[in-house]
Image: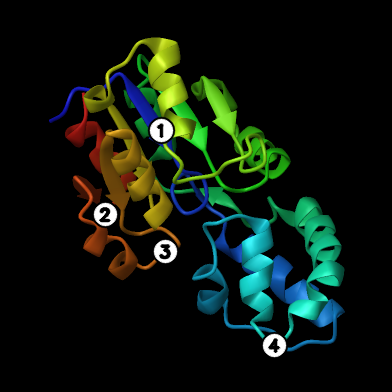
């Protein structure tokens, strides 16, 4: 068990199962543009680097000319439907209660307004000292500055802070900041993309965090 004073959580695929609403919004966008829908798992493999990259990857190299038209369609639709089927992963409320005495921050590459609305809509905003979306700063995960600002703010040494997430950017954020990395292996991103990065810790269920950290 590792002692920590700060826990940084990813949102999509870590705290919340957002995949159905993301995939639904992407396929709505493609239909709106007269393009064919994509498989849900393929769409989710494009998640992790923000909305613009999601749409660019969805369109593929041969349809980038549709990007300008696709973005407003996606943003409007997803903004209206981001909580249709999105739910917390099992055990999240208990985990947050387990670490009630610790500093906790959400850092996502999802847009700030979407990130905040999901955290608030799921009723967990009061658990966090801060919630950071991908357009709040001019840099995104895995840039270490997103994490080190909280180490400096709260006077915490890197070895007593951890990043928990289901994506490569989460593992790399922790490594870049000298923090403990913990990969959640049952999120949106295939574990085959996480394990080669050699995270310090892994968990199959978020409730395991209560045994991994104190």
Q: Quadrant of the C terminus?
A: top left
- 164 in relation to 67, above or below: above
Query: If you read the primary sequence from the N terminus, does the residue marked by circle 1 or circle 2 appear first?
Result: 1
Closest to the camera, between mark 1 and mark 2, is: 1
Q: Which residue is mark 1?
A: 8
At mark 4, the secondary structure is: loop
Reading the image, the residue beneath label 3 is 189
Q: Position of residue 51 (x, y in %)?
A: 66, 58
Q: How many marks?
A: 4
User: What is the number of the mark on residue 62?
Assistant: 4
Disc 2 or 3, which lies upstream in sequence? Answer: 3
C-alpha gap between disc 1 and disc 4: 37 Å
Foreground disc of the pair 1, 4: 4
Cβ–Cβ under 8 Å for marks 2 and 3: no
Quarter occupied by residue 75:
bottom right
Q: Secondary structure at mark 1?
A: strand
Disc number lying in front (2 or 3):
3
**Which class describes the residues within 10 Å of circle 3: few (<14), some (14-19), or many (20+)?**
many
Looking at the rendered image, the quarter that the N terminus falls into is: top left
Q: Quadrant of residue 122?
A: top right
Residues under numbered marks 4 and 3 in contact, where contact means CB atoms less than 8 Å apart: no
**Marks 3 and 1 close (CB-CB < 8 Å):** no
- Residue lying farthest left? 1
- Label 2 and label 3: CA atoms lie apart by 13 Å
Q: Nearer the viewer, residue 84 or 162?
A: 162
Residue 151 position by quadrant: top left
Position of residue 93 measured from the top left corner of the image (x, y, whole percent): 44, 33
Q: Secondary structure at mark 3?
A: loop
Measured in 3D between alpha carbons, the distance from the residue under mark 3 to the one under mark 1, in whole angstroms, is 18 Å
Question: Which residue is pictured at 35% across the width and 33% down the height?
Answer: 95
Q: Which residue is mark 2?
A: 204
């Amino acid at each position: 068990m590792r002692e920590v004073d700060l826990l940084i959580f990813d949102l999509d695929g870590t705290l919340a199962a957002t995949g159905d609403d993301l995939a639904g919004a992407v396929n709505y966008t493609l239909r709106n543009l007269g393009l064919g829908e994509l498989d849900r798992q393929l769409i989710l493999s494009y998640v992790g680097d923000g909305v613009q990259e999601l749409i660019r990857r969805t369109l593929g190299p041969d349809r980038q000319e549709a990007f300008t038209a696709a973005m407003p369609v996606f943003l409007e639709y997803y903004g209206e439907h981001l909580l249709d089927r999105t739910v917390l992963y099992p055990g999240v409320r208990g985990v947050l209660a387990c670490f009630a005495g610790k500093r906790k921050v959400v850092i996502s590459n999802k847009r700030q307004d979407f990130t905040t609305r999901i955290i608030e809509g799921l009723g967990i905003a009061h658990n966090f000292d801060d919630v950071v979306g991908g357009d709040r700063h001019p840099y995104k995960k895995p840039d270490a500055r997103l994490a080190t600002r909280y180490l400096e703010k709260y006077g915490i040494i890197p070895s007593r802070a951890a990043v928990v997430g289901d994506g490569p950017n989460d593992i790399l954020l922790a490594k870049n900041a000298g923090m403990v990395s913990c990969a959640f292996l049952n999120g949106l991103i295939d574990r085959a993309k996480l394990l080669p990065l050699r995270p310090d810790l892994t968990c199959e269920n978020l409730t395991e965090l209560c045994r991994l950290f104190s």
